[in-house]
Amino acid sequence: MKTRLSVNVNAVAMLRNRRDLPWPSVTGLSAIALEAGAKGITVHPRPDQRHIRRQDVRDLVAMIRKDFAGKELCLEGYPDKGFLALCQEAKPDQVLFVPDAPAQTTSDHGWDFEVNEVLLRDVIALMKRSGIRVSVFVDPDPTQPAKAAAVGADRIEIFTGPYGACQVDTKEAKKHLADVVATAHAAKAAGLGVNAGHDLTPENLPALMKEAGFIEEVSIGHGFTADALIHGFAESVRRFQRAMGEI
């Protein structure tokens, strides 16, 4: 079975940037994850380059194209001029547009499609002319996928933070899981691919995959890195794959 795990390595870059040293290596640890079976790598290069730098993106493109044919790179970011230019230079397999302000610590809400309709139509069309698959970040709300389809997106990524923040198998977790699943089914009905991300772990992924096994990609950074501090990058890839029923 084709894996759905895309490892977000922003936290690796953040740790590296504490010192003027080349380690821990963004490309080195990405390679370990890909060799262990991850589908791809996700990075979110923010304008201030406080973790992933533009050169990291170039290095990842070169490494994946040379050594990991069939693996994917996803660039995540707000569609300002700098990010769009980087996407056109790098030509990743997928771009995820998020509505983040520059100072945000992480993406924590989906797009307001009514307010941003023109912007999203324009930038999605620009990326698709370059042959790049486009995903847009949405709240776990089944009314949102149709709006994403209307602006031209290929996929949505459902913000799973509210679900991930809950203890597994609690009443609150079941409510938030139901919202995510309903959104995933609405996206499928709208003809969109479905990705998911934020605070997914080996403990809470099985319930999600049981209800929405058609999800094409899960993008995991903080939770994956926390797990890898205990188990190592390669073993954490396998732990997440086991949680998704892939091995």
Image: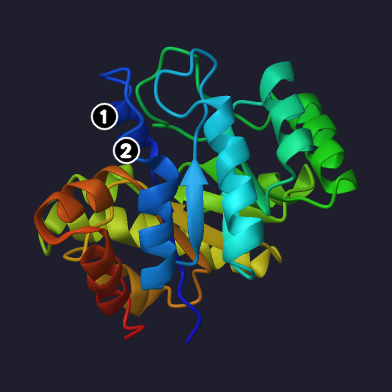
For the C terminus, the image quarter is bottom left
Front-most of residues 229 and 81? 229
Q: Is residue 97 visible?
A: no
Residue 120 can be seen in this image: yes
Label for residue 12? 2
Q: Residue furthest right?
A: 129
Q: Quadrant of residue 104?
A: top left
- The amino acid on which the numbered mark 1 sits, given as a three-letter code, is Leu
Mark 2, other Cα within 10 Å: few <14 / some 14–19 / many ≥20: many
Residue at image point 59% right, 57% down: 64
Which residue corresponds to the image point at 44% horizontal and 55% vertical from the top-left?
A: 196
- The residue under the point 49% across, 69% down is 215
Q: Secondary structure at mark 2?
A: helix
Q: Please, what secondary structure does the residue beneath circle 1 have?
A: helix
Q: Is residue 9 left or right of residue 83?
A: left
Q: Is residue 241 above or below residue 89?
A: below
Q: Are marks 1 and 2 in contact (CB under 8 Å)?
A: yes
Q: What is the x, y in percent for residue 230?
A: 9, 55
Task: State the residue position of label 1.
Answer: 15
Q: Amino acid at mark 2?
A: Val
Q: Alpha-carbon neighbours of circle 1 within 10 Å: few (<14), some, or many (≥20)?
A: some
